[in-house]
Image (cartoon, rainbow, N blue to C red):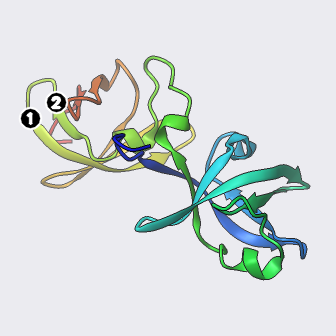
Protein backbone atom coordinates (compact mmCIF):
# COMPACT_ATOMS: atom_id res chain seq x y z
CA UNK A 1 0.00 0.00 0.00
CA UNK A 2 1.28 3.43 -0.84
CA UNK A 3 1.90 5.70 2.10
CA UNK A 4 2.35 3.00 4.72
CA UNK A 5 5.60 2.37 6.56
CA UNK A 6 7.46 -0.79 5.60
CA UNK A 7 6.84 -3.72 7.91
CA UNK A 8 9.63 -5.09 10.03
CA UNK A 9 10.39 -8.72 9.23
CA UNK A 10 10.90 -11.16 12.08
CA UNK A 11 12.78 -14.38 11.37
CA UNK A 12 10.84 -17.40 12.65
CA UNK A 13 12.67 -20.23 10.94
CA UNK A 14 14.72 -21.48 8.03
CA UNK A 15 14.27 -23.64 4.94
CA UNK A 16 16.52 -26.56 5.78
CA UNK A 17 15.70 -29.20 3.23
CA UNK A 18 13.60 -30.40 0.33
CA UNK A 19 10.63 -32.74 0.61
CA UNK A 20 9.71 -34.85 -2.38
CA UNK A 21 9.86 -33.77 -6.02
CA UNK A 22 6.85 -31.42 -6.19
CA UNK A 23 8.38 -28.25 -4.74
CA UNK A 24 7.77 -28.84 -1.03
CA UNK A 25 10.35 -27.63 1.50
CA UNK A 26 11.38 -28.80 4.96
CA UNK A 27 11.17 -26.11 7.61
CA UNK A 28 13.22 -25.63 10.75
CA UNK A 29 11.18 -23.50 13.16
CA UNK A 30 12.44 -21.21 15.93
CA UNK A 31 8.90 -20.81 17.32
CA UNK A 32 7.50 -22.52 20.40
CA UNK A 33 5.68 -24.74 19.68
CA UNK A 34 7.62 -25.46 16.49
CA UNK A 35 4.50 -25.93 14.35
CA UNK A 36 3.32 -22.37 15.15
CA UNK A 37 5.30 -21.17 12.11
CA UNK A 38 2.87 -23.11 9.90
CA UNK A 39 0.00 -20.85 10.95
CA UNK A 40 1.19 -17.84 8.95
CA UNK A 41 -0.24 -17.37 5.45
CA UNK A 42 2.70 -15.32 4.10
CA UNK A 43 6.40 -15.92 4.53
CA UNK A 44 9.24 -13.65 3.47
CA UNK A 45 12.09 -15.95 2.45
CA UNK A 46 15.67 -14.80 1.95
CA UNK A 47 18.35 -13.02 3.91
CA UNK A 48 18.23 -9.68 5.74
CA UNK A 49 19.02 -7.61 2.66
CA UNK A 50 16.73 -9.37 0.22
CA UNK A 51 13.56 -11.34 0.94
CA UNK A 52 10.80 -12.43 -1.39
CA UNK A 53 7.15 -12.92 -0.58
CA UNK A 54 5.68 -16.45 -0.62
CA UNK A 55 2.19 -17.67 0.18
CA UNK A 56 1.86 -20.88 2.18
CA UNK A 57 -0.45 -23.14 0.18
CA UNK A 58 -0.21 -26.17 2.43
CA UNK A 59 1.82 -26.94 5.53
CA UNK A 60 1.89 -29.82 7.96
CA UNK A 61 3.85 -31.85 10.45
CA UNK A 62 5.37 -34.82 8.62
CA UNK A 63 6.75 -37.20 11.24
CA UNK A 64 9.30 -35.13 13.16
CA UNK A 65 9.63 -32.60 10.33
CA UNK A 66 7.63 -29.57 9.26
CA UNK A 67 6.95 -29.31 5.52
CA UNK A 68 5.32 -26.65 3.36
CA UNK A 69 4.20 -26.08 -0.21
CA UNK A 70 4.62 -22.48 -1.33
CA UNK A 71 3.50 -20.12 -4.07
CA UNK A 72 5.63 -17.23 -5.31
CA UNK A 73 4.62 -13.55 -5.51
CA UNK A 74 2.74 -14.28 -8.76
CA UNK A 75 0.76 -16.91 -6.81
CA UNK A 76 2.33 -19.71 -8.86
CA UNK A 77 3.10 -22.84 -6.80
CA UNK A 78 6.73 -23.91 -6.77
CA UNK A 79 6.58 -26.52 -9.52
CA UNK A 80 9.35 -28.90 -8.58
CA UNK A 81 12.36 -29.77 -6.47
CA UNK A 82 14.66 -27.50 -8.52
CA UNK A 83 12.51 -24.44 -7.77
CA UNK A 84 12.46 -25.31 -4.07
CA UNK A 85 16.25 -25.79 -4.09
CA UNK A 86 16.67 -22.02 -4.59
CA UNK A 87 15.18 -21.49 -1.10
CA UNK A 88 17.47 -23.93 0.70
CA UNK A 89 19.21 -22.49 3.79
CA UNK A 90 17.32 -19.17 3.58
CA UNK A 91 15.52 -17.51 6.51
CA UNK A 92 11.74 -17.59 6.85
CA UNK A 93 10.35 -14.33 8.21
CA UNK A 94 6.91 -12.86 8.78
CA UNK A 95 5.81 -9.26 9.15
CA UNK A 96 5.95 -8.02 12.74
CA UNK A 97 2.32 -6.92 12.51
CA UNK A 98 1.24 -10.51 11.82
CA UNK A 99 2.50 -11.74 15.19
CA UNK A 100 0.08 -11.90 18.10
CA UNK A 101 0.64 -9.26 20.76
CA UNK A 102 2.38 -10.71 23.82
CA UNK A 103 0.61 -10.79 27.16
CA UNK A 104 1.41 -7.97 29.60
CA UNK A 105 4.85 -8.56 31.11
CA UNK A 106 5.88 -10.84 28.24
CA UNK A 107 8.14 -9.78 25.38
CA UNK A 108 9.43 -11.08 22.09
CA UNK A 109 13.18 -11.47 22.23
CA UNK A 110 13.68 -9.48 19.03
CA UNK A 111 11.91 -6.50 20.62
CA UNK A 112 14.43 -6.51 23.50
CA UNK A 113 17.60 -6.78 21.43
CA UNK A 114 19.14 -3.36 20.98
CA UNK A 115 17.49 -1.79 24.04
CA UNK A 116 19.65 0.15 26.47
CA UNK A 117 19.94 -1.35 29.98
CA UNK A 118 20.07 0.98 32.98
CA UNK A 119 20.14 0.14 36.70
CA UNK A 120 17.52 1.54 39.05
CA UNK A 121 20.31 3.87 40.28
CA UNK A 122 20.86 5.23 36.75
CA UNK A 123 24.08 3.35 35.87
CA UNK A 124 24.21 2.57 32.12
CA UNK A 125 25.17 -1.10 31.64
CA UNK A 126 25.06 -1.15 27.83
CA UNK A 127 22.76 -2.66 25.23
CA UNK A 128 21.05 -6.03 24.88
CA UNK A 129 22.99 -7.77 22.11
CA UNK A 130 21.48 -11.25 22.38
CA UNK A 131 19.20 -13.47 24.42
CA UNK A 132 19.83 -16.90 25.92
CA UNK A 133 17.44 -19.63 26.93
CA UNK A 134 18.58 -21.47 30.06
CA UNK A 135 15.55 -23.56 30.93
CA UNK A 136 14.97 -21.77 34.24
CA UNK A 137 14.53 -18.34 32.67
CA UNK A 138 15.64 -16.30 29.69
CA UNK A 139 18.80 -14.22 30.04
CA UNK A 140 19.67 -10.80 28.60
CA UNK A 141 23.19 -10.61 27.14
CA UNK A 142 24.20 -7.00 27.80
CA UNK A 143 27.35 -5.45 26.34
CA UNK A 144 28.70 -2.16 27.61
CA UNK A 145 32.01 -1.66 29.38
CA UNK A 146 31.94 -5.47 29.61
CA UNK A 147 29.49 -8.29 28.98
CA UNK A 148 26.86 -9.06 31.60
CA UNK A 149 24.28 -11.83 31.75
CA UNK A 150 21.11 -10.62 33.47
CA UNK A 151 18.19 -12.97 34.11
CA UNK A 152 14.99 -11.78 32.48
CA UNK A 153 12.95 -12.15 35.65
CA UNK A 154 10.31 -9.44 35.74
CA UNK A 155 10.03 -7.56 39.06
CA UNK A 156 12.99 -9.38 40.64
CA UNK A 157 15.77 -8.20 38.29
CA UNK A 158 13.95 -6.43 35.45
CA UNK A 159 11.90 -3.66 37.01
CA UNK A 160 10.59 -2.01 33.83
CA UNK A 161 10.70 -2.45 30.06
CA UNK A 162 10.04 0.64 27.97
CA UNK A 163 9.92 -0.53 24.36
CA UNK A 164 8.94 2.90 23.05
CA UNK A 165 11.73 4.61 25.01
CA UNK A 166 14.24 1.88 24.17
CA UNK A 167 15.20 1.15 27.78
CA UNK A 168 15.16 -1.75 30.21
CA UNK A 169 15.51 -0.86 33.90
CA UNK A 170 17.15 -3.49 36.07
CA UNK A 171 17.84 -4.01 39.76
CA UNK A 172 21.42 -5.16 39.19
CA UNK A 173 24.77 -4.43 40.79
CA UNK A 174 26.98 -2.82 38.09
CA UNK A 175 30.04 -4.57 39.60
CA UNK A 176 28.49 -8.00 39.07
Residue 173 position within the rendered picture, expressed as x and y whole percent measured from the top left = 18, 33
* Residue shown at the point (25%, 29%) measured from the top left: 164
Label 1 sits on a secondary structure element that is loop
The correct choice, above or below, for 77 with respect to 176 in the image is: below
Q: Nearer the viewer, residue 108 or 69?
A: 69
Q: Nearer the viewer, residue 88 or 28?
A: 88
Residues at marks 2 and 1 touching, judged by CB atoms closer than 8 Å? yes
Q: Nearer the viewer, residue 137 or 70?
A: 70
* Residue shown at the point (15%, 39%) measured from the top left: 174
Residue 120 position within the rendered picture, expressed as x and y whole percent measured from the top left = 15, 23
Residue 30 position within the rendered picture, expressed as x and y whole percent measured from the top left = 61, 51
* Residue shown at the point (77%, 82%) measured from the top left: 82
> Which residue is the site of mark 1?
123
Q: Nearer the viewer, residue 125 or 19?
A: 19
As measured in the structure, the alpha-carbon distance from the residue carrying label 2 to the one carrying label 1 is 5 Å
> Which residue is the site of mark 2?
119
The correct choice, above or below, for 58 with respect to 83 in the image is: above
Q: Horizontally, is 129 left or right of 167 in the view?
A: right
Amino acid sequence: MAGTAPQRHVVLGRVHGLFGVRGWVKVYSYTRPAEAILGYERWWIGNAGERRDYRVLEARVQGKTLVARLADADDEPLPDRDAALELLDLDIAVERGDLPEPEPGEYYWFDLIGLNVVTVDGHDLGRVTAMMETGANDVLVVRGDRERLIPLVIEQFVTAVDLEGGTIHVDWDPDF
